[in-house]
Image (cartoon, helix red, strand yellow):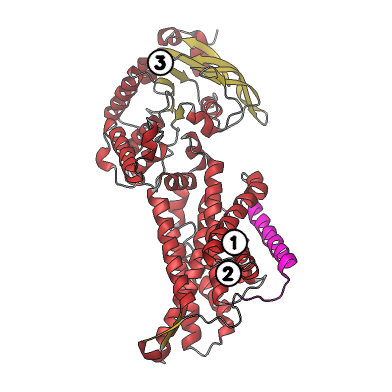
Amino acid sequence: MLKVQNLHKAFGGVKAVNHCSFTVEKGSITGMIGPNGAGKTTMFDLITGLMEPDEGHIIIKGKNVTSHPAHKRAKMGIARTFQAIRIFSEMKTLDNIVVALKDHPEKMYQAFLPLKKKQKKIEERAMELLKDVGIADKAHLNAAELSFGQQKLLEIARAVATGADLLLLDEPAAGINLTLLNQIRDYILKLNKEGKTFLIVEHNMPFIMGISEKIIVLDYGQEIAVGTPEKIQNSDRVIEAYLGKKKE
Amino acid sequence: MPEILPQIIWFSLLASAIYALIATGLTLLFGILNFINFAHGDFAMVGAYVFFALAIMLGLPWWIAVPLVIACCALMGVVIEKITLKPVRKSPSFTPLIISIGIGALLQAIITIFFGSGVKSYRVEGAETAIYKLFGGSLIVTQSQIIIIITTILLLIGLHIFLKHSKTGKAVRAVADNMEVASILGINIDKTISIIFAIATAMAGVGGLLIAYEQNLSVTMGISLGVKAFAAIILGGVGNILGAVVGALVIGFGENLIVGFTPIPANFKDAIVFALLILMLFIRPNGLLGEKAESQVRK
């Protein structure tokens, strides 16, 4: 689904992503962990096309997209959320979803349906997505009026609305209560069952270890360990990256 | 005094309508690209001259000339953005601002080369425009003035519907809100910016040809139009469409009411606009409908 090959990005002397390679298998939930400043968010920016790498390749669904602009990659079925919520706060909750929905008509003749009918169909689909995350009753409020947790749900629903089958979530569990956390986990698992692939950056270890099949650990922009959650939890190298070297 | 009131209100409405057409485009561009386009008044000037070339020099009927003016101005806006502004999109906002001053000068020079620097007029010898007398003769209205008001209202309503209800309009608002997020949702930023430039310059062009219908054409007409549109969006709150319309109304009414009811002579109109602007910057620097600076920072 996603292949990152020898990816490199430096800001001045700081190597944010340092010749990093990994793969995310189709249909999987892959976790990405690492200490602060390990290059996780930069990695997301590179994969989604918000930044250009200095070296290396990004391959999505077997296609080299390294030089594709962000909107083209989005059309190939890749979407993301941000560490700091970035919803369109001045727009209605519903419109946040409508903007992201692809309105490719399923059949040719549907392109010729009257505009109003088409518009209604798009809004119905947007409502369904809001229902899935439990904020349908807030559809006509300005997105800025939603609570922090609801904004997080909206951002995930917006990523789903793009029709993407590869979803990159940047700290979905940060700063929310346990009830909401469980809701987000259930939503991710449900979407995964429907065939969506996830790459999730997270600091909440119980959450990410519980949900992922595979964990990639980044440190100083490099992948230092890849494996099942159990394997990662027992890896000396990972413990070292988080806690520093043990004194001999 | 009161017997001239209807006439002054009518003139105020006319002026406001033209300023609103130019100011809404200016505020749209600011909302998306975060820069003040100092060539915007000159886009209006080009629209006025293109209509002059098509309708007066070539003698095309207005229903062919007007759509051509709209198309020419839209195309001009798109091409200018692609050549001059797109390469500096990631620069600080004063870079496109300075470039836009250069574009304005360039447009004035090009128009001077083709049309000369003399004042032109749409009025054809012998042709009479229809005049209507209302309120027992205290309000005189010409046909072209009615066209100006109706056109403006239709265009503004159209713009509102486009931005609020069409999918492309929503994409425009998404790009204005956050360009990066819009791009990762699959919205083509370059295309959206082109659409906005096309709309903004086409509206300015229509504004220019409408004002030229009322007054005359001159190569420098855009400068004062641009300044007034700029004042209107500052008054109403930058980046806010409704604010631009409100600002245009304040300026249109302000300058005409003050000139009409005080001993201040009419050639002080521009000074009045600036006085309003300075006053506004003292009282409400974010404009009538603008948000407080702190809430903008939070975004």
Mark 1 crowd level (few <14, some 14–19, many ≥20, 10 Å Cα) = many
**Mark 3 residue type:** Gly
In the image, residue A156 lies at what x, y percent? 38, 31
Q: Is residue A18 left or right of residue A137?
A: right
**Mark 1 residue type:** His
Q: Locate residue B66: give its quadrant.
A: bottom right
How far is disc 1 from disc 2 in space, using C-alphas?
Answer: 8 Å
| Marks 2,3: beta carbons within 8 A | no
Residue B107 on the magenta span: yes
Label 3 resides on the chain identified as A
Mark 2 crowd level (few <14, some 14–19, many ≥20, 10 Å Cα) = many
How far is disc 1 from disc 3 in space, using C-alphas?
Answer: 51 Å
Q: Secondary structure at mark 2?
A: helix
**Mark 2 residue type:** Leu
- The residue lying at 42 percent from left, 92 percent from top is B1
Q: Secondary structure at mark 3?
A: loop
How far is disc 2 from disc 3 in space, using C-alphas?
Answer: 58 Å
Is most of the magenta stretch helix, strand or loop? helix
| Marks 1,2: beta carbons within 8 A | yes
In the image, residue B62 lies at what x, y percent? 54, 66
Residue picked out by circle 1: B40
- The residue lying at 26 percent from left, 28 percent from top is A179
In the image, residue A31 lies at what x, y percent? 44, 18
Residue lying furthest right: B113
Residue picked out by circle 2: B225
Q: Is residue B59 above or below residue B27?
A: below
Residue picked out by circle 3: A27
Mark 3 crowd level (few <14, some 14–19, many ≥20, 10 Å Cα) = some
* Residues shaded magenta: B93-121
Q: Is residue A42 left or right of residue B240?
A: right
Label 1 resides on the chain identified as B
